[in-house]
Image (cartoon, grey):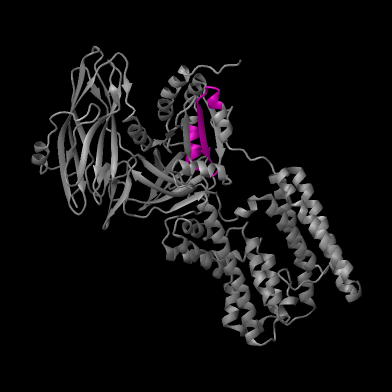
Amino acid sequence: MIGKRFRGGAGSALGLALLVAGPAHALESAPFTSPQTSVTLVSEAAAVAPGEPFRLGLRQKISPGWHTYWSNPGDAGEPPALTFDLPADASAGELQFPAPERIEYGPLVNFGYENEVVFPVTVTPPADLRPGQSFTVRTDAFWLVCKDICIPEETSFTLALPVEPTGRSDAATAPLFAAAEASLPRPSVWLAEAGFEGDRGVLRLSGELLSPDAVTKAFFFPAEWGVIENAAPQELRVGQGELSLDLVRAKGELPERLSGVIAVTDAAGSRSAYALEAPLGPVPPAASSIGSTGLPLWQAVLFAALGGLLLNLMPCVFPILAMKAVGIVALAGRADRTIRLHALSYVAGVVLSFLALAGVLLLLKGAGMAAGWGFQFTSPLFVAAMAWLMLAVGLNLSGVYALGGPVSAGSGLAAKGGHAGSFFTGALAVLVATPCTAPFMAAATGAAFAMPPAATLAVFAALGLGMGAPYALLAFLPRLARLLPRPGLWMERLKQALAFPMYGAAGWLAWVLTVQAGADGLLLALAGALLVAFAAWALGIAQAAGRRGAWAGRGAAALAMLVALALLPQLRAAEAPRTVTVAAAAAEPWSEARVTELRRQGRPVFVNLTAAWCITCKVNERVALDTAATQEAFAAAGVATLVGDWTNGDPAIGALLQRHGREGVPLYLLYPAGSGEPVVLPQILTQSIVLQALEPVARTAAQVPAPSKG
């Protein structure tokens, strides 16, 4: 690989031989071509105005396997450069660099670009130009392109642009510059701090929009060479409102402030970049919740197994764990084979339940929905059903009724055919474990969903094996069960005592319902709990009455449970309204019919497809949509704003995304008034992108006659 800060003249002869003699098109120069690259100078302006800045771009089309470089090329390389030869009183700004990619080459890591990239630069023509003249731009360009070898390339470009009283952009190149601007780092919306102690360092961001469910990947690109080890892994930790990356210090001197670009990938798969500058001081604390997605599979599996093992100690799992312990005690004195099979049945219930949960999560994420560990507890229906189940388990433990199924406290497990009880006790343990998170779990599950589905399932299987490990040990060493105390009255008392954690869990879930569904939802849940309690009492009476009176009690219990289940759908109506923060205060919910109606009224329409878990959507709203300038421009042009909330995977929104070639949010559509196809804005927005896209739509709206009222 080429050394740091290399710039040779080996490519000069090639560059001079291919000097551009004249423009092939008014807005783009004739290309410099080589086996490695095809490079042009492209203009955003079809015509320039005197003294009015406009943008040019160095456009590189890079052959497969080759790459060029960012402003800090990393361990080796050289960034591109332009040297302008402009008329008097004209000026050119600095070359702007899009957010780079991390490019590995053996032990080295470079920062640069593959496939295609545009480097924008702002040029200001002289103020004394006259319409009818031509403004000519000449520039010498240099860049380095590398694969297994590095080749310096250079050439000169010339563009002659017409001068008119008002500058005019061109529809052919406007999307190219919009995409280029979207790829530039935006100002950070978070507070940044950093520090090093020896070789170890931490970069920490804090502020809104950061959460384990929103951020899946992050990487910091330093602006200066020699500050950090580029090849060192940057372990990601994400907590609520905070993010941190582990850094390794290089051998160079540290600056007073750490500056660079952080690239963040959100839950929707969108990558956006933010320029930040952090004062260097003591090492800041890492984010409180680990959400690393850079773990290798073996480490994710190890963390999952450890997390599953520790999950047994969490408050939400302990009651089920104790129930299983009582069941194991009841097996004392049984044959080794019996103990082994019951333990394996429990472990199978745990592992298969984890695999089923992983499968559901993969399906939901594939459908674009925000689903993570404990996602089912976001549904009031599920929370109410779980509260009733916890109540039923508690009543069983208190002796109100007897049941040898999944809620058995142990007596059914000892009976012949009780393996189903062991299996479903394991399934129940997984179900009630999902509100809790043990150490190592967040790192493992966060990494799992950044991996292929097979690897995701492997991580969740390890989580199940870790949780079932104490009972798997009994399967391989069944004689350990003989060390447990012998069954006796103490076991019955312990079983009854375990009912109270279950009642506590039911009460906690009822409180959760007050947040999700308000007072009406809580009333429905309490009514259902009363019916569940009556069903348990009726079933207990039937069991005590024997065969003669069993049918009446069982029938009453079944009827009460059916009425309770009938209450669940009504929780949807009681559910607290979900709100999605939108840019425009007067935004309306999106629908195809509403878009058609507004356009018939002669109004342009801006459609914002977003989701509560999409961090890119939220940043776009803050920096580009929810600004005074954007809102004033929307109001002046009479643009109606419609918001489509894809948080819960609306099929109609999914169909709209597919029509525009998108698999997820964000998607921004700007419809002109009347008829015509919408303008699709980039997924990464800036205020200028929105305002530039609005200009032609606003002109079209001004030309559309108002609809007749007669």
Where residue 135 sits in the image (x, y, percent)? 21, 19
Q: Is residue 583 above or below residue 458?
A: above
- Residue 476's x, y, as percent? 56, 82
> For this rendering, which residue is in front, 293 or 223?
293
Instruction: Looking at the picture, tell me which residue is in the foreground, 63 or 7.
Output: 63
Identity of the residue furthest to the front in this view: 710
The residue drawn where x is 80% and y is 60% is 561
Instruction: State the image coordinates of residue 359 (x, y, percent, origin top left).
Output: 54, 61
> Which residue occupies the foreground of this view, 16 or 309?
16
Q: Position of residue 111 (x, y in %)?
A: 29, 46
Q: What segment is highlighted magenta in the picture?
A: 598-622
Answer above or below: position of 261 versus 636: below
Q: Which quadrant of the rendered structure holds the C terminus?
A: top right
User: Which one is in front, 695 or 95?
Assistant: 695
User: In the displayed structure, would residue 226 be above or below residue 344?
Assistant: above
300 lies above or below 224:
below
Residue 576 appears left or right of 265: right
Quarter where residue 424 is shown: bottom right
Asked if residue 295 lies in the magenta stretch, the reply is no
Residue 615 is inside the magenta segment: yes
Q: Is residue 284 visible?
A: no
The answer to which quarter of the image holds residue 29 is top left
Q: Is residue 156 left or right of residue 211?
A: left
Q: Is residue 500 left or right of residue 599?
A: right
Q: Is residue 356 in view?
A: yes
Residue at coordinates 43% horizontally, 19% vertically from top-left?
699
